[in-house]
């Protein structure tokens, strides 16, 4: 048997055996893509199984993540720390071979995939990060950033809408080092796809400005090799390789059927497949010569050693650049970060400006983007509304040759990163933006942030969740966060969104009330190295909330004003908890109540996710037992009962189209209504 | 001035004046699309301003909904009940001219638009409904269903991923009576789109199997007229007309700039625009001759009268068909619906089967789809997992000519609707499916339902919200609703999804525990004429929960088992509230606790959204004051505190990839842990 076929059959056997052992999983895609994998991983992929984090490795993404046994087989065979015992434990608790590939769980897995279309979009983000880093850091004779991003995908990924957003961006950005291989097997879970999928995919991708190769025979390793070689010389376009394959190839009775997709072949069919393939080895046994053919350890170590030499030369020639590159790829914040953060908050406190919190965000961003060259901003076509751009972040642009355009002084220095545009016009592509940002964060070298209206977090919701699941630092700037946006009406007014984002595990949500809280929220978000953050910001102006100090803001909630602040020296009878734009209402209500000798504490809670992480002692110090609590937020009330509130001033219906001030009255967001609610609670208790 | 130009300038003047008066809104799109509107509304659109609900009217969708003044101007000018006073009140509270067009608020508005890409997708759903109804109901010489769906859209809609899903489906479905006009002005909010939008849109749409016309000059009414005429003769393809326009046309200084997009022109520029257009009339004044040119009342009334005659002839020839058509378009359920619903629940109760609730859903669907020919099902490529298909719902297919394929006996009867495939393979397009379903519901004649995994409700979330905002009966079948799906792991395991869907105002959420609750959930969903429903269903088998009766299930929560059921004749000391797959845990815990003389009531709460609508008396009868409550659900705990729970057995982290039974133990979903939690609560109270 030819060497390549043996290598491919090793994947097929491992895939069908692991799925059979687990009696769960998807054998069809690994068996169908095995020959393509031989071509890419056997001849081109630059990687070192002994160091999965080598910065200049090629990135490989399995966007059709249900075919996880493909990547597990590849990682095992090429020499990653993924012994055969892990493959035998496929899909079992705490194995390194989860049902879908998970970054951080399995060495060599670059992103968590499964929700279709997002792996492809992550890959676009990775390829963008590579291109930008290369522009910033490479120097003549020193190409320390020079790798490809490869992505495998099926028709599921290509049916998903996000594939449109991602691939249109990849075309516009001329990501020539992005190479996508489409496993064109004509089968999806519901069967032969023709009744519901008639796209001329090559024509579609050409329309995005891609280089399209094929269709080629996806079982002809030499043909796929030639296609990849062709793709790698593209100077200004990403490449799609269309590979015609047979799902479940090797299985006499399941190949080319939807039944090959998502279930074990069955003991009998596994046996027949072994026979048909001429694969005589026991389950999970791979002959040594096949291991030897697959082994990438020596080649990978040599490649990395060569790069290490080059990086040493780079370090000698450009020591500051090399140090900066190393810091950036580690994801470490600059040494002066803490000072920058304090300065930003203190400056906000000193100025005490009345501005919208989206503007407060831009003010904070001015400081942070100036100090952190790794911040890579953007907006889904709402730059002037989200206020995500700053003086330090010119628009990112590419020239006709596909190169990143440099800033005016971009060529000025050999010892500092070249100055690139750091604000991305993502177009009207919220989901794509979010998943591209995930890819940028996964690649490393940048901290991505991006803006849209809060309500359209719905569009990007699963990518936000994926960042939280993957523990990646991605920052979402969600402006126009309530009925306070006014006339645009209920389609644009967030009602359930703040509460609903707070339910996503490991997502930090901040809704600051003024410039100081916004600066602190940004600082915490940037420090959240293992967690994404959503910043919810107002369209409308908000007065500065006078405060004694700034140190407790980062804890997510703090005592903003005791009754004494409004001249009533009594212990609080009630606590008003408020967030964002409603903090001012709480303060005014406190004042009105004080005039009636009712003593109220105002707690500002910009982030309940951060507050929930505090010690029990701190929590009790902010929300003492036995004192009734009233929450005020322009959104659904449901989320507030967990703080033991006696009442919530919220909105449990959709908004209306009208000027914001009209809506505040209509929905009861007035100091009077807040004060009335407090009085009602107190009278109920007597 | 030419008549057409006068007509177009009336739109431009009304748009700029209304936006100026409100000092809020988007003049650019209405001014840019005014000439296109003259072509379509002046020459082709079949509508009767005096009866916006005439069943055979053409449907018109403004997918770029921010350009709302375009449709308000058109409705006003052509004679709808939208007097000039409403236009003067643009974007004011309770006017009929909300910031974005809202169905149900403004006569003649067919769908609520604003969230980009969804209007286009609704239009695909409308065109599909038309095609299916025509196939079912038209007879030789009696074409009572014969109208077009027109949609206007901008580059924002075309950048959104959902446009890919929608337009691929429209191509696969050969929706030849769908005509989309693309306002190709090259400008989006962030400016000239070329850096971020380089799609060759005509090539892209050809790749979807569309007929593409243009680019044509969007300011040449005759050219647009010809394009529409050409589009209307397409026999088997939807049509895209690419119309090159100038955003804000007419404004000397704002045209062709992003500044024209989303803000008032300003008093001075309004004046200059008046001069440049030669429009000498005061704000909100339109000369009588222009009104006369626009007036569509007589023509519309004649068209409808002609249709009424034809419908009378149809009624005479096919009285049963006509009655059925009328019922279906009114959205009335069949007369025997109540009996069908009762029978389904009673049958489930009698059989008391142990099946997954997704299977229970299919069992209920067998009954309902047999009785309700208007049910139009589907799945986003998970038919065999979602179990959305039934014996009555063959796959929907189209033949090469673009006609709907009929079932075997589809031609058999002249007096019953022809039998079409009623299960749609939507492909891997969750968001597209949801927004297509919204369009089908808006058109009328069908009750759409569709399935995917619960976690991927994230993808379709904003379309679910839009159905709730629009008060449309759309039913989402979300299976694999927890860690109970097992090996597929955290990317697929819902954690926050049930809680998060419950936050969407006017969305009913059901998570039934067995076959009877599932049958009732379906019945309530079908009766919810003004509300969408999400059914959350298990992958894994669930035992039947013995119950005294079925009548309280529809109230959303009910007493499932008192302590007496497990032989303990004491008053309950605690209430366990459980949903879906966790009800069995509650029952087992109840039994274990009874053995220790601890008396517990078990409340099954399949729908807290339905329960929240019940009377205070009923609520107290289920959840009596003073007895501690413990909630059990495999999802985030946050949502349960509103029921005053003392403890929640939930999951506030992501799941793991492992067999379901392993996960249940790992995360504490065992009767023992539930019983322990109850004991801990009771001991805390003493």
Image (tube, coloured by chain):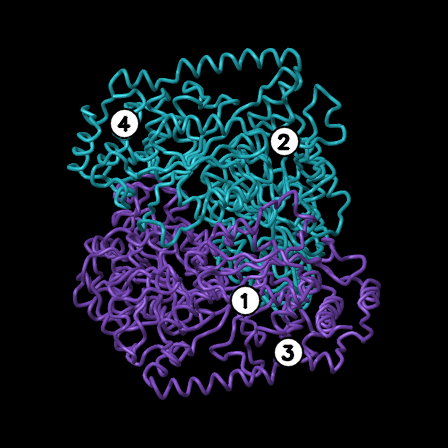
Chain colours: A purple, B cyan
Disc 2 to disc 3: CB gap under 8 Å? no
Disc 1 to disc 4: CB gap under 8 Å? no
Front-lying residue, B238 or B113: B238
Q: Where does label 1 land, which residue?
A: A150
Chain letter for mark 1, please.
Answer: A
Mark on residue B9? 4
Front-lying residue, B187 or A413: A413
Both labels 4 and 2 in a single chain: yes
Q: Position of residue A480 (x, y in %)?
A: 32, 51
Q: Would you place residue B334 above or below residue B431 in this image?
A: above
Chain letter for mark 3, please.
Answer: A
Mark 1 or mark 2: which is in front? 1
Residue B104, quarter of picture: top left
Q: Would you place residue A180 above or below residue A429 in this image?
A: below
Callout 3 environment at 10 Å: few (<14), some (14 to 19), or many (20+)?
Answer: many
Q: Position of residue B343 (x, y in %)?
A: 72, 35
Query: In this rendering, does residue A94 appear at all?
Result: no
Both labels 1 and 2 in a single chain: no
Q: Secondary structure at mark 2?
A: loop
Mark on residue B374? 2
Disc 1 to disc 3: CB gap under 8 Å? no
Both labels 3 and 4 in a single chain: no
Front-lying residue, A424 or B588: A424
């Amino acid at each position: 048997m030819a060497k390549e076929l043996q290598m491919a059959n090793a994947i097929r056997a491992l895939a069908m055996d692991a799925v059979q052992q687990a009696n769960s999983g998807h054998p069809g895609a690994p068996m169908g893509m095995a020959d393509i994998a031989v071509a890419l991983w056997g001849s081109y992929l630059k990687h070192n199984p002994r160091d999965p984090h080598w910065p200049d490795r090629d990135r490989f993404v399995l966007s059709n993540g249900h075919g996880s046994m493909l990547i597990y087989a590849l990682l095992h065979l090429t020499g990653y720390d993924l012994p055969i015992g892990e493959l035998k434990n496929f899909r079992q608790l705490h194995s390194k071979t989860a049902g879908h590939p998970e970054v951080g769980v399995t060495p060599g897995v670059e992103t968590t995939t499964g929700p279709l279309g997002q792996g492809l979009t992550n890959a676009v983000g990775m390829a963008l990060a590579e291109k930008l880093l290369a522009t910033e850091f490479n120097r003549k004779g020193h190409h320390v950033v020079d790798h490809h991003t490869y992505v495998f995908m099926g028709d599921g990924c290509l049916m998903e809408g996000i594939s449109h957003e991602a691939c249109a961006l990849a075309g516009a950005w001329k990501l020539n080092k992005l190479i996508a291989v489409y496993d064109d097997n004509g089968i999806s879970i519901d069967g032969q796809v023709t009744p519901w999928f008639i796209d001329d995919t090559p024509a579609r991708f050409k329309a995005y400005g891609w280089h399209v190769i094929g269709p080629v025979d996806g079982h002809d390793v030499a043909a796929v090799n030639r296609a990849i070689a062709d793709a790698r010389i593209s100077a200004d376009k990403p490449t799609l390789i269309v590979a015609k394959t047979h799902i479940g190839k090797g299985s006499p009775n399941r190949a080319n059927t939807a039944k090959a997709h998502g279930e074990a072949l069955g003991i009998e069919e596994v046996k027949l497949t072994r026979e048909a393939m001429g694969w005589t080895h026991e389950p999970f046994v791979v002959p040594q010569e096949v291991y030897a053919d697959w082994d990438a350890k020596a080649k990978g170590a040599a490649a990395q050693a060569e790069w290490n030499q080059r990086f040493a030369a780079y370090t000698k020639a450009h020591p500051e650049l090399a140090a900066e590159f190393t810091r950036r790829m580690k994801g470490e914040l600059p040494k002066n970060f803490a000072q920058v953060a304090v300065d930003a908050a203190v400056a906000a406190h000193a100025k005490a400006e009345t501005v919208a919190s989206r503007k407060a965000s831009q003010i904070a961003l001015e400081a942070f983007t100036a100090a952190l060259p790794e911040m890579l901003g953007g907006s889904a076509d709402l730059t002037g509304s989200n206020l995500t751009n700053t003086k330090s972040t010119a628009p990112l642009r590419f020239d006709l040759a596909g190169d990143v355009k440099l800033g005016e002084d971009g060529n000025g220095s050999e010892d500092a990163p070249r100055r690139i545009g750091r604000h991305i016009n993502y177009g009207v592509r919220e989901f794509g933006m979010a998943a591209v940002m995930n890819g940028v964060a996964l690649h490393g070298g940048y901290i991505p942030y991006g803006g849209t209206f809060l309500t359209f977090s719905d569009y990007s919701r699963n990518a936000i969740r994926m960042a939280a699941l993957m523990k990646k630092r991605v920052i979402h700037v969600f402006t126009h966060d309530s009925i306070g946006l006014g006339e645009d009406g209920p389609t644009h007014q967030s009602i359930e969104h703040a509460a609903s984002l707070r339910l996503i595990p490991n997502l930090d949500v901040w809704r600051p009330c003024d410039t100081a809280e916004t600066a602190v929220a940004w600082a915490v978000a940037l420090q959240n190295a293992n967690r994404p953050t959503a910043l919810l910001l107002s369209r409308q102006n908000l007065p500065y909330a006078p405060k004694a100090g700034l140190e407790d803001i980062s804890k997510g909630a703090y005592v903003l004003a005791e009754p004494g602040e409004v001249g009533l020296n009594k212990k609080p009878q009630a606590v008003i908890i408020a967030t964002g734009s409603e903090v001012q209402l709480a303060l005014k209500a406190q004042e009105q109540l004080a005039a009636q000798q009712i003593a109220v504490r105002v707690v500002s809670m910009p982030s309940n996710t951060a507050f929930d992480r505090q010690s029990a002692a701190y929590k009790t110090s902010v929300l003492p037992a036995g004192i009734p609590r009233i929450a005020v937020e322009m959104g659904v009330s449901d989320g507030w009962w967990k703080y033991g509130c006696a009442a919530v001033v919220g909105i449990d219906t959709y908004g209306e189209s009208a000027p914001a001030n009209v809506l505040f009255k209509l929905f009861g967001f007035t100091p009077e209504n807040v004060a009335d609610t407090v009085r009602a609670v107190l009278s109920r208790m007597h």
